[in-house]
Amino acid sequence: FLTTMASSFTVCRLHMRGRILSKRYCSSALSSAEKIECKSLHALQVERQDQAEKSVLISCQSRTSEKKFLKFLSKHGDIKKYFFYESYGVYAVVEFASRDSVSSLLESATIPSISQESIVPFKSRLLSIRNLSSVNQQLNRKHLGFLLLGCVEQQILSLTKAYQLTEENSRLRFLVCSLLKDIAAAYFPECTIRPFGSSVNGFGKLGCDLDMFLDLDSISGVCLQPKSGFSLEYQMKRVNSERAITQSVLSVIGECVDQFGPGCAGVQKILNARCPLVRFSHQPSGFQCDLTANNRVAMKSTELLYLYGELDPRVRSLVFTIRSWARSHGITSSIPGAWITNFSLTIMVLFFLQRRGPPIIPTLDHLRDLAGPEDRSMIEGSDCTFVRDFSKIQLQNNTETLEQLLCEFFEFYATFPFSRMSINIRKGKEQNKPEMSPLHIQNPFETSLNVSKNVNSTQLDRFMALCQESSWLLQQNKTSTPNNTPTPWGLATLLLPSQVAGIKSGKKRRREPASERIKSLLESLKKQNQEKTG
Ligand code: CTP
Ligand code: MG
């Protein structure tokens, strides 16, 4: 009935967004899910990891009877939460109340019998269920009609709501880390794999990549050395640098993922990068994964971004809007190159919010000054200390609306003296540029580094020109009010590349799926309207 899944998929749709088909939470569970919002990132990660370890990922036939499916699984114990989603077929994430239930379920699973192919006998918590009869599943498609409705403020809030990571998507990210940990645990049983970056920093959009950190620091021996008598120590291989260890660990784990990892495809080992990584596609979840090790500073910057996003709801909404805007104009891209990255863009938004009068968020230096001894953190010579207790942070009374902030953001960067000045969220004030890269954004913790070193002047010019154009377009909107005709309005104007006239990229711009969908939606509504009135 249940078979461990070792087959590989042939279809490759890396950035496909999974659709949630149905979900169930008991009422107490729902309220705890809502409460997650005000937790520290650490508490949130501990809770999510625990959920993930009690969960299994099951590939279902498209017409699986939900009732029978649950009845069958609950033979192994109480199911706490579950949901179905669609990505390369239908999948279910099932969280049991106890780990014993997962062990019991795994014991009952069989190895698939395949006649033509051979299988790698690696057992994981990724399973397939078969022989179930039909069910009626309602597809819950997200639609983009919101872009036609309401004022800019409402449009921004709707955009944020529609694209931010859902509870289910976030659980799936932790589950994929937990599945990967099972592979790495073959060599390093005490390791943990934690998500970082936009999967957990509060600024993740559905479909964003899954950045994972293989943490070997949790592997520890007994620290106390006895004063006399015998003591034992492990004999361990010595290597000449931390970097060499990271490279060899990632090389071996990458090889295991490639050779044994169910559902893992397209594994690339990028070990000579500044931050060595293994990149692959996890097909059952549809996530593009980047596995790194020894990348603790990035964990801290994730925590910092999370904190800023929690301080004021306008932070997340503005970052979301700017990220969507940048993506629809090809300012950012999923392909590595001379473009501005989402991380750089997020820091630019944070910097802008620090420059408001009064500032909406404090500087990083201020957060460091508020830190207590428990917050102290030095990583490889970089001071990563900042306060983590939100209640110690006093905010100033800034009442600007999101619409004002969006407009001001575009004005601010349309005229920013990029040629002379560097963006610095530590000081909350632009600083003289220490080197001549076109765009200089100081890395918040590794202060000698520029996070946007990759950006060339063509890309920076495009960004500035688009800021100028978008600011102008928003000014035009102020003089006209929204009406009931489905013409692009407010934020919708900004997200349609065709609306932003006069911007020449030199190269033919690739149209992004989101803006394509918005465009076709607008066109079909326009047509409907013409049919009605005509
Ligand atoms: N990071 C960093 N310094 C950089 C690039 C990245 O510290 N020069 C850290 C940041 O914490 C960032 C994380 O690594 O959030 C992951 O990087 P990346 O995947 O490039 O950015 P995300 O914030 O995850 O955004 P996206 O949705 O585009 O993946
Ligand atoms: Mg990322």
Image (cartoon, rainbow, N blue to C red):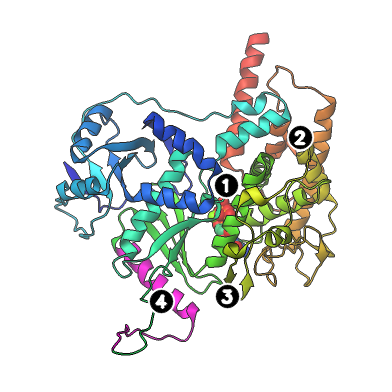
Instruction: Decide if residue 534 is in sight here.
Output: no
Residue named by callout 1: 202
Under mark 4, the amino acid is Ser
Residue named by callout 4: 248
Quadrant containing the N terminus in the rendered view: top left
Find out whether the residues at labels 1 and 3 contact each other: C-beta distance under 8 Å.
no
Left/right placement of residue 135 relative to residue 203 reads left
**Region in magenta:** 230-259
Q: CA distance from mark 1 to mark 2?
A: 20 Å
Under mark 3, the amino acid is Glu
Task: Pinpoint residue 163: horizontal percent, then vertical percent.
Answer: 56, 38
Secondary structure of residue under mark 3: loop
Q: Residues within 10 Å of mark 1 (few under 14, many from 20)?
A: many
Instruction: Give the mark nearest the N terminus, 2 or 4.
Output: 4
In the image shown, does 387 or 2 lie closer to the viewer? 387
Whether label 2 lies within 8 Å of ligand 1 gets the answer no
Under mark 1, the amino acid is Gly
Instruction: Give the mark nearest the N terminus, 3 or 2.
Output: 3
Task: Pinpoint residue 195: horizontal percent, then vertical percent.
Answer: 47, 55
Secondary structure of residue under mark 1: loop
Residue named by callout 2: 401
Instruction: Decide if residue 153 is in sight here.
Output: yes
In the image shown, does 351 or 59 lie closer to the viewer? 351
Residue named by callout 3: 380
Instruction: Give the mark nearest the N terminus, 1 or 2.
Output: 1
